Amino acid sequence: MLSSNIFPQLQSLETPFYLYDIPLLRRTVEAAKAAADRRGYHIHYALKANPDRRLLEVIAAAGLGADCVSGGEVRRAVECGFAPEKIVFEGVAKRDEDILFAIERGIYAINCESLEEVVVINSLAEQAGRVAEIGLRLNPNIDSHTNEHLTTGRSDCKFGISRREMKELLRLLPDLKNIHVRGVHFHIGSQILDMSVFEAQCHKAQEIVDDLRDNKGLHLEFVNMGGGLGIDYHNPEQNPIPDFEGYFATFEREFRLPEGMSMRFELGRSVVAQCGELVTRVMFTKTNESGRRFLIVDSGMSQLIRPALYGAHHEVRRLGEGEGREVYAVVGDVCESSDTFAYQTELPITHRGDMLSLLSAGAYGASMASCYNLHPLPEAHYWDRE
């Protein structure tokens, strides 16, 4: 927990703000890359987790690629030093101008999520006088057994090409002269800690890849397994770096990679979540009729929406010395009852002006922040000393 170690330096800063531990980020990236490199795997960092320029520069410098889900993210990745040949472009509703930008930049692959998208990209590439490199994101109909809002691989989800559409696409492919199918892509959800889910993903992907190669005649260069590796939100200080070794070992053990194909992953949360925390200040305290004690802070769901949106858990820590203990509800400054960071958390006795930190907020914190209620976006501060 970086903020507790450098608390004196933080007291004069205007809250709320995100604080990023750059040395921890570097160690996390090194651990992920080392585990992947041992197996010849490639990692594309998922910008949607956090597109902060400083973090992206660190990640790009380490040699990771980029996974983008919008034209804005593709442009940000290029600006922050990711080589185009290491960029992949996902998303169910890509704009024509963003598709053309990706084609013109020569990114590694545009991963398509519907039959119509493939047809449109072929037309746009023809207009540009180019051949577009694409991947096919397929829906494997696998339940990731994670939060309902974080699962993406079931047949009732909006993501991926269905089996029905795939049959029609295979029929049309010979006539689509301005696309080249480079590989296939599977992503089934996020914050997955049960490795048996990834085992099931491997088995389904194996069946599909072998069929496409052996029976459908597709010459595939890659299989992209997406991301999804979770982190320890409940014990972040004890487990700051996820089990990348166990994660990649699962795919090595359970998926027989055909000769000549590469395996790719799109890790986001597991790379940046633990290096970031949201630091906020207590504005008021109060006790309601039921006896519940509240800490009302100067940040809220407009700065960190995950608890309100998903019921997500973030450990709360009080910064500085304190005596005694009290159980509090920590609530935000937005006019919504769901704007609650913690319904019942035990902290040292806390007063107006004290600072709190919400841990494990480096992923889907700043990237999902808004100006709801016209609250300003939070600043970012970085610690880059060991």
Image (spheres, rainbow, N blue to C red):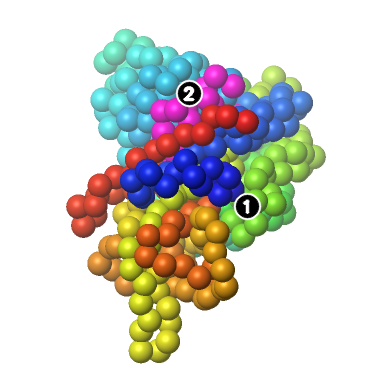
Q: Is residue 261 left or right of residue 75?
A: right
| Residue closer to the observer: 63 or 337 | 337
Residue 86 x %, y % = 52, 20
For the point 42% across and 60% down, which residue is it?
354
First to last magenta residue range: 43-62
Asked whether 298 or 340 is in front, the reply is 298
Judged from the image, the secondary structure of the residue bearing numbered disc 1 is loop
| Quadrant in the picture for the C terminus | top right
> In the rendered structure, does residue 56 fall within the stretch colored magenta?
yes
Residue 233, image x, y percentages: 59, 56
Specify whether residue 91 is painted magenta.
no
Residue 160 image position (x, y, % from top left): 46, 44
121 left or right, relative to 274: left
The residue labelled by disc 2 is 57
- Picture quadrant of residue 81: top left
Q: Amino acid at mark 2?
A: Glu
Q: In the picture shown, does residue 189 fall above or below 224?
A: below
Number of the label disc, if any, that sits on residue 212: none
In the picture, the disc for residue 236 is 1
The kind of residue tagged 1 is Pro
